[in-house]
Amino acid sequence: MPNKANWIDRAIAVVAPRTAARRVVARAAFDAVARKYDGAALGRLRDGTARSSTSADAEIGRALPMLRARHRDLVRNNPHARKACTVWKNNLVGAGIIARSSSPDPDLNAQTDALWSEWVAQADADGQLDFYGLQELAVGIMVEGGEALIRRRGRKASDGLAVPLQLQILEGDHLDHTKSGLISNGHKVVQGVEFDGIGARSAYWLFRDHPGNAWVMNSSRLRSDPVPASDLLHLYRKERTQTRGVPWGTAVITDLLDEAEYDLSERIRKKIEACVVAIVTGADEDDEGLAPVKVEDADGNAIEKFEPGMIAYAHNGKDVKFNSPQATGGYVDYKSVRHHVIAAGYLIPQALMTGDLSEVNFTSSRVGLVDFRRLVDAIQWLNIVPMFLAPVRAWFCEAAFLAGKLPVPYVPCKYSPPAFESVNPIDDANADLIAMRSGTLTWDDAVAKTGRDPDEVMNEIVERNKKFDDAKLILDSDPRRVTKGGNEQPSQSQQAAEAFAPRSRFRTVA
């Protein structure tokens, strides 16, 4: 509201104009200070919006156990929560993020990749999954419970492993969240994570067993002990400077519970409506007022509960009125709105969570996936690779070097996440082809987008083309022999002759 002179200012202005002007200026300055941010204003309508400015660790420390328990229960029993977590696992990891050696030495790359492939099948300390299965397990635990722990387990040479190393995947419950404060060595512990004097992680305080196991009764099993940070990886999505991670559906736990209760109430209402088939009403005029009104079954017993197929008799009833269950108005619209809210809380498109494509078309579905795929790409490269895959690769190379399996302590690599399936493969392939021909996309990048190794693909093409040539086979898919239009490619001698042939300055017109 603009600052205008009120009647008092105008009265003062008659005898003291300068004083009146100072009053108006002062009031304007006061209003400017008081209204810096409307969102921070307090008043009758904002009394319930006051919030504390606590740190992320302070909030998580109090709420993490309950958030984790509630979200896990929802994933077990709520189809939308379960599907949302599955969508994240499928898109972040899929069948696995593949690592391929990328050192300048081709022989070293081949040696390392062969050893890596052999170790991948032996990576699980439980002996059930391969390394790609451990990726899916760790990411799933992170999405559902907020965080996952990956522990390095050294093995003996006599164990017969390709590399004396295995990985153990643990849930965040193993991390003692009650352990906080300064300890005897001068380090600081925050919710089970120990930091040294410069703020680097130096240890993790772990329980020997999952504290939620029913058989863990011995107090010594519930005592946490420090594990060096060099032997443990802590995988979670770091959105603030928090030490621990929270479940990815935290923002919509209440919405999921409310929607489930709404569905339950609707189902109960439908069951009650379906129980009563008919009610016999309409008493004789002579009998009215002689007895209190009551509802009985066919045997004359008073009705105190509803049962399927029941016919109720009002006192002295003569008329039969059949029950007609009514459809719930606005039910579909309400559910659609809640699904959009829940999907937004999980940061995924609504169609992926529900499988309902009735509200999207081809164009809107592609546009909606653009931002989601960008988020998937960011989490893969900013969280999963640096916090999980790269350290595991370093552990592998170190163990292989110490075991005499590799000549160097580390071999660099490139990671290939699973490719996104194209909604319109023809248009996408043409777009990649145009980008490669214009120089804005390399062939290696185009192949890497499919989740495959460019060198491996090239070697397969060379070997297959040689077999086709030896068998004197010409396929339409061979650009060496066939043009894009399906015609035979001119030979190199023909191309050279055409390139250097003299051209006439004149054109013959028929």
Image (cartoon, rainbow, N blue to C red):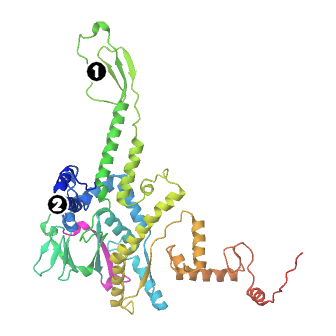
Q: Nearer the viewer, residue 478 or 329?
A: 329
Whether residue 181 is in magenta: the answer is no
Counting from the top left corner in percent of width and height, residue 331 is at 39, 41
Q: Residue furthest right?
A: 510
Provide the residue span drawn in magenta: 156-176
- Mark 2: few/some/many CA within 10 Å (<14, 14-19, 20+): few
SS type, badge 2: helix
Numbered mark located on residue 259 in the image: none
The vertical placement of 446 against 144, above or below, is: below
The CA distance from mark 2 to mark 1 is 83 Å
Q: Which residue is mark 2?
A: 19
SS type, badge 1: strand
Quadrant for the C terminus, please. Answer: bottom right
Q: Nearer the viewer, mark 2 or mark 1?
A: 2
Counting from the top left corner in percent of width and height, residue 504 is at 83, 86
Q: Which residue is mark 1?
A: 295
Q: Nearer the viewer, residue 126 or 151?
A: 151
